[in-house]
Image (spheres, helix red, strand yellow):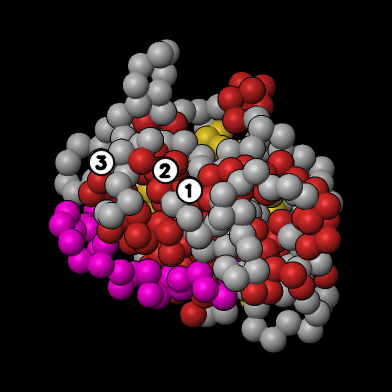
Amino acid sequence: MDPQFKKILQQKRQNVEDLFDFEGCKVGRGTYGHVYKAKMKTSGKEYALKLIEGTGISMSACREIAILREISHTHVISLQGVFLTHASRKVWLLLDFAEHDLWHIIKFHRPKGGKKSVPIDTKIVKSLLRQILDGIQYLHSNWILHRDLKPANILVMGDGLERGRVKIADMGFARHFWAPLKPLADLDPVVVTFWYRAPELLLGARHYTKAIDIWAIGCIFAELLTSEPIFHCRQEDLKATTPYHHDQLDRIFTVMGFPHERDWEDIKIMPEYKRLQEDFKKPSYVNFASCSLAKYMDKFKIRHDSREFSLLQKFLIADPNKRISAELAMDDAYFREEPYPTDDVFDGKPIPYPKREFLHDDEHEEKHDKNKVRHCVFIFSPEIIQI
Ligand code: ADP
């Protein structure tokens, strides 16, 4: 590096702790990062500061920064800046702060202490789904796959200018899919959290498509309607290095029925097809196309002749080529019948959900069982930050 440039840069650098208050304000932990609620000292404005796990610019941090810097959409979280430090080789992302997320909203509605669950308001569900689709349609039309859609990654803004707006977050797994030099599966063999993983991924698809995000949206939609993960599988093998997962497939087949060649022509060319046939020799499941999903949803009072059920079915089609696109889904009759979706998903009413709690490291390990903070000195990167 040019010594003069290096000197100027060093003079400009600031300590992140001088710019923001965030000590003790950890609000979330993911697979690759720790998220803090931060208040800018000068303006008092709130942000989310995401500390990337480990040191240096990991593949996931690199992707997330590269993609977030390129995109701009109402329903995708906005990157306001990046902080880097030479001394400790840490990376921080400065993002808009979202008070809620679907993981917490759904948890709020789950049955507790023997009490029956109260479903999420149908209008809120519709508005949430419409905005998720809008954000994903934007990503897909810009040749970006999210690849890790799940309730924890769908944020919702609290009171303020953007009240009740969905923001799709965590682009650590996202990537461009236009003309990849290698099959995407060779580059990243395991994508999407198990419960939201499409059947083609579980069967080892090498050239997966936008349809994997759509399947995940179907799972999220079902979860919003029922407050339970539709393809909940007890045995999550977190260290799995292959996408095939017997128990997850079993769960999908139990709810949806077993897919036959007439429903999904290419199933026989899936890399794990042989294993599927061996593991599921005498399938006790009904046919995929039958009304198995209808029976499951009926338990949650979602009728098979309702518009919401009809759309849900289009997201959860086994054959990825037949699965609906985000664009078509946004145009579905479900959104054209009352109650109409609103820009503020809470429709101006008081927000019934609690605000984010601050977490202590140990407490969070237990609470979320998901995903660890070290305080270091961070150096302001004037090349990237734009507050
Ligand atoms: P990872 O990339 O490590 O999985 P995430 O980006 O998913 O990390 O963040 C982990 C958790 O932190 C999320 O599930 C969410 O609850 C919270 N979080 C993430 N981004 C924000 C944000 N912009 N505002 C508020 N909370 C956030």
Give the left or right position of residue 88, taking residue 313 as reference.
right
Callout 1 touching callout 3 (CB < 8 Å): no
Q: Amino acid at mark 2?
A: Lys
Q: Secondary structure at mark 2?
A: helix
Instruction: Report how far apart the C-alphas of labels 3 and 2 lie in the structure.
Output: 22 Å
Instruction: Report how far apart the C-alphas of labels 2 and 1 lie in the structure.
Output: 5 Å
Between marks 3 and 2 in the image, the one whose residue lies nearer the viewer? 2
Taking depth in this image into account, of 154 and 109 the one nearest to the observer is: 109
Residue 241 visible to the viewer = yes
Residue at 56% of width from left, 49% of height from top?
286
Mark 1 / mark 3, whichever is N-terminal: 3
Callout 2 touching callout 1 (CB < 8 Å): yes
Q: Is residue 222 magenta?
A: no
Label disc, if present, on residue 295 of the rendered structure = 2
Q: Secondary structure at mark 1?
A: helix
Per the image, the residue denoted by label 1 is: 292
Residue at 36% of width from left, 37% of height from top?
300
Residue at 57% of width from left, 68% of height from top?
263
Q: Give the magenta range.
A: 319-345
Residue at 77% of width from left, 50% of height from top?
281
Q: Using the rendered view, name the quadrant where residue 299 is placed.
A: top left
Q: Is residue 337 magenta?
A: yes
Q: Crowdedness of circle 1 by 10 Å Cα count: few (<14), some, many (20+)?
A: some
Q: What predominant SS class does the magenta segment belong to?
A: loop
Is 16 rendered above or below residue 307? above
Q: Using the rendered view, name the quadrant where residue 101 is placed.
A: top left
Per the image, the residue denoted by label 3 is: 121
Q: Quadrant of the N terminus?
A: bottom right
Between marks 1 and 3 in the image, the one whose residue lies nearer the viewer? 1
Q: Position of residue 163 (x, y in %)?
A: 27, 50
Q: Secondary structure at mark 3?
A: loop
Give the left or right position of residue 55, taking residue 147 as reference.
right
